[in-house]
Image (cartoon, rainbow, N blue to C red):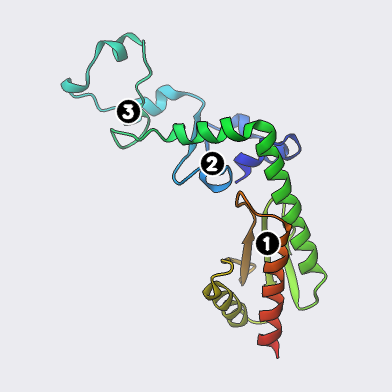
Amino acid sequence: MSGTAALCPEFRHLQDGLEYADSYCFDPHKWMFTNFDCDCFYVADRKALIQTLSVLPEYLKNKATESGAVIDYRDWHVQLGRRFRALKLWFVLRYYGTEGLQFHIREHVRMAHQFANWVKNDERFELVVSPPLNLVCFRLRGSDELNQQLMDTLNRSGNLFLTHTKLSGQLTLRMSIGQTNTVDRHVEEVWKLIRDEASRLLG
């Protein structure tokens, strides 16, 4: 997701060192409001990529490619054909513009940090890591089984969907804020649902 965050100057430090990479990709379908699937892929030297994946039977040879008049993207990936994924991203960029996308990214980060503060201020929970962007990793103080039960019950409700990971050997819940229409009210409602279910589980 940090690829999308780089639209905002204040988050670009997360990309420090990227200039030394041979290749880089990020998915606009994860936080840039573009339908699945869409990936932005950059390479420092496209020649190495093309030589690796190039397949050139006689029926694919053409003067436009051979003369360099066009860039033939068939050799940039494993599959020969490709859908026009860039078009849906183009529509998003045209609709929101840079400032519109920056606004939503900043709002999502702000809401995630607000959520993280609520977690920190509730003694029943712990913030496992401070969120750099819009993903909050937290857990209910207690066993992995208790956290699994909390997540499963909340997810079954259909009102929210949490994912999980393991950090320091403990099951950790993940709250990602990045949907186009998410506003403060939604995050407040989710926190209430989480607290209510925690109260029920803890008796």
- Residue 74 — which label? 3
Vertical side of 166 occupied by 106: above or below: above
In the image, what residue type sits under mark 1?
Answer: His
Quarter of the picture holding the C terminus: bottom right
Q: Position of residue 154 (x, y in %)?
A: 58, 74
First of labels 1, 3 by sequence position: 3
Vertical side of 77 occupied by 163: above or below: below
Identify the residue position indicated by label 1 in the image: 186
Circle 1 sits in a helix, a strand or a loop, which is it? helix
For this view, does 162 lie left or right of residue 35?
right
The quadrant where residue 97 appears: top right
For this view, does 104 lie left or right of residue 74?
right
For this view, does 157 lie left or right of residue 80?
right
- Residue projecting furthest to the top: 67
Identify the residue position indicated by label 2 in the image: 28
In the image, what residue type sits under mark 3?
Answer: Arg
Q: Residue at x 30, y 37 (%)?
A: 79
Which of 83 and 140 lies nearest the eye of the viewer?
83
Does the residue at mark 1 contact the one at mark 3 (Cβ under 8 Å)? Answer: no
- Residue projecting furthest to the left: 58
Real-space CA distance between mark 1 and mark 2, rounded to the nearest whole angstrom: 23 Å
Q: Is residue 67 visible?
A: yes
The quadrant where residue 62 appears: top left
